[in-house]
């Protein structure tokens, strides 16, 4: 079985995240770039299946700037077998339409039995790309899963929704997305870090995916109309304990409708 795990490099959520005020795009240099944590959980699902089925091949696929290779190498150090890096300056700032078309072309080129992704990224929180990929590729999507069972021919699991859970299943090939109900990913060990340097990573450009300008003209339909610097955080209310602190605290919480 060939499992492709979609990996996105995002700014560390522990750092300050900013928008580029000129382009309206996420300022990817504002914080330390890391593998999106939900993608690491997706990779862990693939690696656990590989642990029990040694003939499984796990491929990580990432669309991103040059330095996204660091995230791919980390995924290789965790246990993935190979990587595909879709990188092209003309794809910077691509919206969901262009991104889904590009990744769909890359998946058609790479081939897959199962694609595993996170339910949504921590930078954009769109959560729509997996569904768009399923539509473009003509395969079923099992999204927002809380657990999964993978066999050689199908997948099944519980889909998590606002009103409860639903048991779902589909034949392979298919796409699935994981939620934070899945386990944390394993840490790369020393052997994994050393062998990751020798694992193959294919660099794929827009031309390799036959994405010519005529085909994608009009695809970038998302337009950022304006951006503004986030206002400085105002100083909070300080309550001195002079014997009336409890009453003052209750009044503050009640006034701000916090209780």
Image (tube, grey):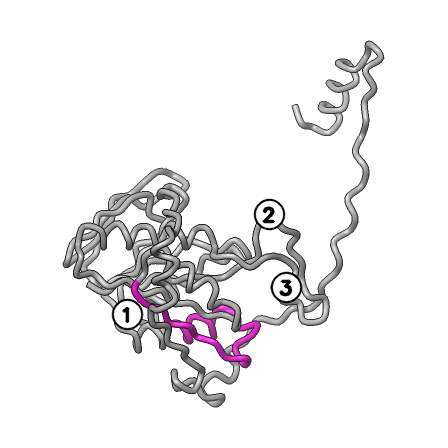
Please state which of residues 176 and 71 is positioned toward the viewer in this rendering. Answer: 71
User: In this image, 85 relative to 218: left or right?
Assistant: left
Residue range corresponding to the magenta coloring: 81-103
Magenta residue check for 90: yes
Residue under label 1: 138
Q: Circle 3 sits on which residue?
A: 29
Q: Where is residue 104 in the image (x, y as percent from the top left)?
A: 36, 73
Q: Where is residue 114 in the image (x, y as percent from the top left)?
A: 26, 62
Name the quadrant containing residue 205: bottom left
Q: Would you say 222 lies left or right of 130 here?
A: right
Question: Is residue 165 positioned above or below 126 on the image?
Answer: above
Relative placement, left or right, of 86 versus 46 is: right
Image quarter where the C terminus lies is top right
Q: Which residue: 53% across, 69% down?
A: 67
Q: Which residue is drawn at 73% across and 18% down?
A: 250
Residue at the spot of label 2:
14
Q: In which quarter of the image is residue 203?
A: bottom left
- Counting other residues with Cα less than 10 Å from the Cα at mark 2, is it few (<14), some (14-19), or many (20 or more)? few
Look at the picture and state if 144 lies above or below 55: above
Q: Is residue 74 above or below residue 158?
A: below
Is residue 234 found inside the magenta-colored segment of the image? no
Determine the CA span between mark 3 and mark 2.
Answer: 14 Å
The quarter in which the N terminus is drawn is: bottom left
Q: Which of marks 2 and 1 is in front?
A: 2
């Amino acid at each position: 079985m060939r499992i492709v795990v979609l990996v996105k490099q995002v700014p560390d959520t522990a750092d300050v995240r900013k928008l580029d005020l000129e382009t309206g795009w996420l300022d990817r240099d504002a914080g330390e770039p890391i593998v999106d944590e939900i993608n690491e959980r997706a990779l862990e699902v693939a690696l656990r299946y590989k642990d029990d089925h040694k003939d499984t091949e796990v491929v990580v696929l990432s669309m991103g700037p040059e330095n996204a290779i660091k995230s791919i190498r980390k995924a290789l150090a965790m246990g993935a077998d190979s990587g595909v890096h879709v990188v092209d300056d003309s794809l910077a700032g691509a919206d969901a339409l262009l991104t889904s078309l590009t990744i769909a072309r890359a998946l058609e080129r790479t081939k897959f039995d199962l694609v595993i992704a996170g339910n949504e990224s921590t930078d954009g929180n769109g959560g729509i790309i997996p569904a768009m990929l399923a539509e473009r590729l003509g395969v079923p999507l099992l999204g927002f899963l809380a657990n999964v069972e993978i066999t050689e021919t199908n997948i099944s699991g519980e889909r998590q929704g606002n009103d409860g859970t639903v048991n779902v299943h589909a034949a392979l090939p298919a796409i699935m997305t994981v939620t934070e109900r899945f386990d944390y990913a394993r840490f790369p060990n020393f052997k994994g870090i050393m062998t990751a340097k020798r694992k193959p990573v294919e660099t794929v450009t827009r031309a390799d995916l036959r994405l010519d300008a005529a085909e994608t003209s009009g695809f970038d339909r998302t337009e950022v109309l304006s951006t503004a610097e986030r206002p400085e955080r105002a100083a909070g209310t300080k309550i001195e304990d002079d014997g009336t602190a409890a009453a003052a605290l209750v009044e503050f919480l009640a006034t701000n409708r916090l209780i």
